[in-house]
């Protein structure tokens, strides 16, 4: 029997012992006790509301009495229960976030009793498996040949995104995309003597952080990517087609291996006095 | 407090790895050694109110990781040490050796021999065939290098929680990056690219303190971080295979060839300079009215980024570039004293402010609004240079000035959603504005309308869909400004995307007329050009019957249409469809499978000009990239016999078929340039086509309550067809390339595991 999640947290000390719950729910209680939830003052009642009736009916009639079953509750009710304690730190701005507005519940990703991860009590061993449920395109991109070490388990979706946030675009964990990337690629922070304007502005103008089949997570292959902006006289605007590629009849160092970067290495900005063209 | 407990797991085993090529790709970000391995251990427990959690994975491997969490409710310590290898390619060939960190040389004898042979040869014969024959024998005996970088990342956080409401966190981060990656850019000009490993020796550190106070009214927080980057090597020095003595001439940057055999004996490249950053933030989330869950969040942050320590390298290493031998040079270019400054006084201030409001004024109605401002102010002192040396070959008397780009981004969005029983509808508006300095547009503004719907069918069906339609425009266009770049006196527009519509004189007006786009400019760079944006997303999840099975269908599309542009990027479309199912009929079995199809279509137009901008559309060329990707995956976990036999199966396949269709009119410069080669305009079918197969099976037998024996296998096959990548050609026209192998492989891993749990 399910009771709507309206009961406020009981103030008095629990009138039961968690061992009573273990009688029927051994695995669930053991799992909770291995987490910090195990130390909650009200123990099971913190989330499931008053349990006296539940236990009393079980003892007297052999049939469990009323209890708040969060697995049947609405996303709003589940979140209200969890945010009662967790509306701070990473979750301070859950309300109004895209995930909140799309009616995700805390238990869409986290599990109190049947968690599989070694941190954050996620329903899956790694957070990306959770995210891929609604973002399958990101799973496909993470399989691309040029990728961050997500599938190797070296970073996670939460390394760059805070899925609980409502204050920043795409829930990134920085004030701006570029600052997020500079967290790990600090050598590109500068400022530099010779700057490259789109690089200073936004890394995703040229890179797809989720994965790409082109070198260095680029959104397009060189030299075509550079020619989206640089159609100068002489070599920049020149067409480099299959004829000039590695298997072509007229190989040129402007189209093979690193193409434009064969000479313009410091494309992220450079400090050499003779580097106004971002070479050297 | 909860009961005391202690659990743990130790996992040991033996691997046997077999990879059929020396490609680095299989081990790009991981380490799979043959022999004894310790993939995992964990000790996790609680004693009174003290909890401890020690975790280790891939013990003593290049991809090892150790995590620790200790503490009680008053003080908690968390530590994480994570090594991430990044292997770029194996067995690259180079004539040079690293004689000391960041210094790549070949013997003066060999340099001298090459220079002598070139000097002795009749100038017209100094061509690819001659040079290839000259360097061939040395390349056959070349130095072999593996390009690999190792990131060693350490994090420590101490969290003090004196009371339930207040906590303070002090963090320290240290990352060392050591190794080599492909330098690219170590070049002596159009005729002499000398690709080398770039020696990397970076250390990044961050010291931070954050505090947070939680009250019934909300949360207030503040934080301060000092982050600093040091590069152990400030420049990369590399010998010019074809010169043992410095020399210069007007065409030295095209050497060696019929135009010149001059140039420097070695080159110098500035590596990323040291830099520092202070970042502070304050913020608060106020619970204004609990019954309506009304929240106001305000965040302000200030950042100060500086780069003012690393000394500039000189204009050049070429001691021959002096006023006497290179009249254009105003001074001895190799003397650092002639630089206008000895280091940059680089300063960027960054401020950001964000306010978010959310409320449920009525039970079924939720309203949200966000404003965010992010502004960078680049106070870096502008430095003027009378000119520069081109690839250490010759002085170019083109005055340059550094350009301190900065920008401001303002974003506002508001949404309202209403629950109509099982259906929730959302409508919203989003505005994004950019102000930029030193660019061809002063402002760009994007306005978009957003709609979303959530449809619930009882507990067995859930559809989430969203649609976004927006348009971006620009203001304050001065298109020729894009030509400025770092030119003190911008010359005639050399960039097709920098030609003003009017007032440029007959040539420019004729060029503009040939664009065929009427009055409005159609040659603005895509990061500022007029753009129409469409985004559609839908995800249907079905959980029929008893909920053991879930089916999901997802569709997602983004379409950036640069509708007013005729040159540069014209459009970028991405479509993806996914179907997915998982089924757990009981405790003993759970299986899943997914298929995702993706299609990326990018259209681009360019124009090939000679020394001056061409004004004929015959010289135009178009590139239409069409990437199709198919990804399959399936897996299952089977309990063959409870508490005895377990089987895990897992398979994944992805095929990316990229194709770049290229076209250019007959009689245009591109087509005419190919006639002597007896080829026409050629598309690029091998546009990073890849296939990757991964199959994994593991059978486990629990021979005692705490003990499990596992037997497993892992097969992965990868192929890539990449039009840019050379194969076994370490010297091609005008270039030495490492050609380090990160290509195809077939990898087989067999392993046994013994796991003890308590």
Image: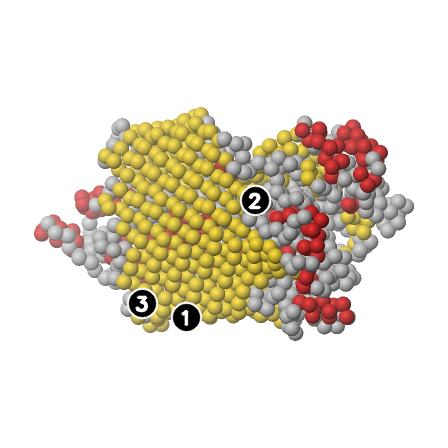
Can residue B482 be seen here? The reply is no
Q: Are marks 3 and 2 on the same chain?
A: yes
Residue to which mark 2 is pinned: B722
Residue to which mark 1 is pinned: B427
Q: Earlier in the sequence, mark 2 or mark 1?
A: 1
| Location of residue B187 with respect to B490 vertically, above or below | above
Which of these two is toward me, B353 or B395?
Answer: B395
| Location of residue B575 with respect to B649 vertically, above or below | below
Picture coordinates of residue A236, whole percent (x, y): 69, 54
Residue to which mark 3 is pinned: B423
Q: Chain of mark 2?
A: B
Q: Is residue A102 left or right of residue A226?
A: left
Which of these two is toward me, A76 or B729?
Answer: B729
Query: How far separated are the C-alphas under marks 2 and 1?
Result: 44 Å
The reply to whether discs 1 and 3 touch (Cβ–Cβ < 8 Å) is no
> Which residue corresponds to the image point at 61% horizontal and 48% vertical from the top-left?
A242
Q: Chain of mark 1?
A: B
> Within the image, what quadrant is residue B637 found in?
top left
> Within the image, what quadrant is residue B8 found in?
top left
Instruction: Work out which residue is located at the far right of the displayed protein and give it.
Output: B324
């Amino acid at each position: 029997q399910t009771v709507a999640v309206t009961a406020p947290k009981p103030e008095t000390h629990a009138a039961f012992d968690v061992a009573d719950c273990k009688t029927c729910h051994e695995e669930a209680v053991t799992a909770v006790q291995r987490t910090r939830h195990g130390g909650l003052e009200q123990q099971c009642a913190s989330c499931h509301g008053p349990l006296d009736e539940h236990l009393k009916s079980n003892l007297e009639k052999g049939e469990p009495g009323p209890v708040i079953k969060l697995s049947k509750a609405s996303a709003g009710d589940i979140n209200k229960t969890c945010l009662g304690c967790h509306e701070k730190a990473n979750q301070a701005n859950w309300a109004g976030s895209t995930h909140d507005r799309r009616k995700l519940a805390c238990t869409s990703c986290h599990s109190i009793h049947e968690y599989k991860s070694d941190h954050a009590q996620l329903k899956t061993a790694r957070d990306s498996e959770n995210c891929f449920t609604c973002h399958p395109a990101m799973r496909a991109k993470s399989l691309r040949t040029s990728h961050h070490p997500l599938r190797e388990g070296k970073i996670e979706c939460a390394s760059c995104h805070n899925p609980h946030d409502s204050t920043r675009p795409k829930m990134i964990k920085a004030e701006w995309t570029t600052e997020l990337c500079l967290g790990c690629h600090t050598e590109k922070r500068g400022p530099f003597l010779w700057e490259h304007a789109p690089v200073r502005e936004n890394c995703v103008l040229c890179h797809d952080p989720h994965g790409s089949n082109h070198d260095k997570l680029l959104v397009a292959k060189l030299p075509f990517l550079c020619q989206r902006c640089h159609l100068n006289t002489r070599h920049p605007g020149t067409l480099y087609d299959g004829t000039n590629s590695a298997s072509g009849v007229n190989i040129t160092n402007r189209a093979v291996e690193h193409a434009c970067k064969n000479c313009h290495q410091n494309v992220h900005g450079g400090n050499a006095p003779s580097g106004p063209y971002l070479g050297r | 407090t909860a009961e005391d407990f202690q659990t743990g797991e130790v996992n040991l085993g033996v691997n046997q790895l077999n990879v059929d090529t020396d490609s680095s790709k299989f081990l790009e970000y991981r380490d799979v050694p043959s022999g004894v391995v310790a993939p995992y251990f964990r000790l996790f427990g609680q004693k009174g109110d003290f909890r401890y959690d020690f975790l280790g994975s891939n013990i003593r491997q290049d991809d090892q990781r150790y995590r620790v969490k200790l503490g009680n409710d008053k003080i908690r310590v968390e530590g994480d040490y994570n090594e991430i290898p990044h292997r770029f390619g194996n067995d690259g060939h180079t004539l040079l050796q690293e004689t000391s960190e960041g210094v790549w040389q070949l013997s003066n004898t060999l340099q001298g021999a090459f220079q002598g042979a070139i000097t002795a040869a009749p100038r017209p014969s100094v061509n690819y065939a001659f040079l290839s024959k000259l360097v061939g024998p040395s390349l056959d005996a070349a130095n072999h290098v593996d390009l690999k970088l190792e990131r060693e990342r350490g994090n420590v956080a101490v969290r003090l929680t004196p009371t339930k409401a207040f906590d303070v966190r002090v963090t320290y981060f240290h990352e060392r990056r050591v190794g080599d990656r492909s330098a690219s850019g170590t070049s002596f000009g159009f005729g002499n690219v000398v690709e080398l490993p770039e020696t990397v020796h970076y250390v990044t550190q961050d010291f931070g303190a954050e505090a947070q106070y939680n009250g019934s009214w909300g949360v207030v927080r503040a934080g301060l971080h000092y982050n600093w980057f040091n590069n152990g090597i400030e420049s990369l020095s590399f010998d010019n295979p074809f010169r043992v003595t410095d020399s210069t001439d007007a065409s030295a940057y095209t050497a060696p060839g019929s135009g010149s055999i001059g140039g420097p004996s070695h080159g110098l490249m500035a590596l990323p300079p040291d830099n520092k950053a202070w970042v502070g933030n304050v913020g608060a989330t106020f619970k204004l009215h609990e019954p309506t869950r009304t929240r106001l969040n305000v965040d302000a942050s200030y950042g100060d980024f500086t780069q003012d320590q690393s000394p500039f390298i000189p204009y050049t290493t070429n001691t021959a570039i002096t006023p006497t031998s290179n009249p254009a040079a105003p001074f001895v270019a190799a003397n650092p004293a002639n630089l206008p400054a000895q280091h940059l006084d680089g300063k960027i201030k960054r401020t950001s402010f964000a306010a978010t409001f959310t409320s449920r004024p009525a039970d079924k109605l939720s309203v949200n609004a966000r404003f965010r401002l992010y502004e960078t102010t680049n106070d870096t002192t502008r430095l003027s240079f009378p000119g520069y040396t081109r690839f250490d070959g010759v002085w170019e008397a083109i005055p340059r000035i550094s350009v301190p780009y900065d920008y401001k981004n303002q974003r506002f969005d508001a949404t309202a959603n209403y629950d109509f029983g099982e259906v929730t509808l959302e409508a919203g508006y989003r505005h994004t504005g950019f102000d930029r300095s030193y660019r061809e547009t002063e402002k760009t503004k994007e306005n978009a309308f957003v709609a979303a719907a959530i449809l619930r069918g009882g507990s067995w069906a859930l559809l989430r869909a969203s649609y976004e339609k927006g348009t971006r425009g620009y203001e304050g266009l001065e298109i020729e400004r894009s030509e400025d770049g770092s030119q003190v006196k911008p010359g005639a527009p050399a960039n097709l995307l920098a030609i003003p519509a009017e007032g440029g004189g007959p040539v420019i007006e004729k060029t503009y007329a040939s664009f065929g786009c009427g009055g409005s400019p159609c040659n603005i760079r895509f990061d500022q050009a007029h753009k129409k944006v469409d985004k559609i997303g839908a995800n249907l999840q079905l959980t029929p019957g008893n909920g053991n099975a879930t089916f999901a269908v997802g569709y997602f599309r983004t379409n950036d249409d640069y509708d007013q542009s005729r040159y540069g990027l014209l459009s970028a479309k991405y479509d993806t469809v996914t179907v997915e199912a998982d089924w757990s009929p009981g405790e003993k079995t759970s299986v899943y499978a997914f298929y995702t199809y993706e299609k990326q279509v990018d259209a681009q137009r360019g124009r090939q000009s000679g020394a001056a901008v061409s004004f004929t559309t015959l010289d135009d060329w178009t590139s239409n990239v069409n990437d199709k990707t198919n990804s399959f995956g399936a897996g299952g976990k089977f309990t063959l016999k409870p508490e005895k036999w377990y089987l895990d199966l897992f398979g994944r396949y992805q095929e990316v078929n990229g194709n770049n269709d290229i076209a250019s009119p007959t009689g245009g410069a591109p087509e005419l340039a190919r006639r002597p080669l007896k080829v026409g305009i050629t598309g690029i079918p091998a546009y990073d086509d890849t296939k990757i197969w991964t199959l994994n099976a593991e059978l486990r037998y629990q021979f005692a309550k705490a003990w499990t024996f596992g037997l497993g296998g892992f097969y992965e096959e990868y192929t890539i067809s990449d039009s840019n990548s050379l194969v076994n050609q370490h010297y091609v026209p005008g270039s030495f390339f490492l050609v380090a192998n990160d290509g195809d492989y077939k990898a087989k891993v067999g392993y046994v595991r013994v796991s003890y749990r308590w």
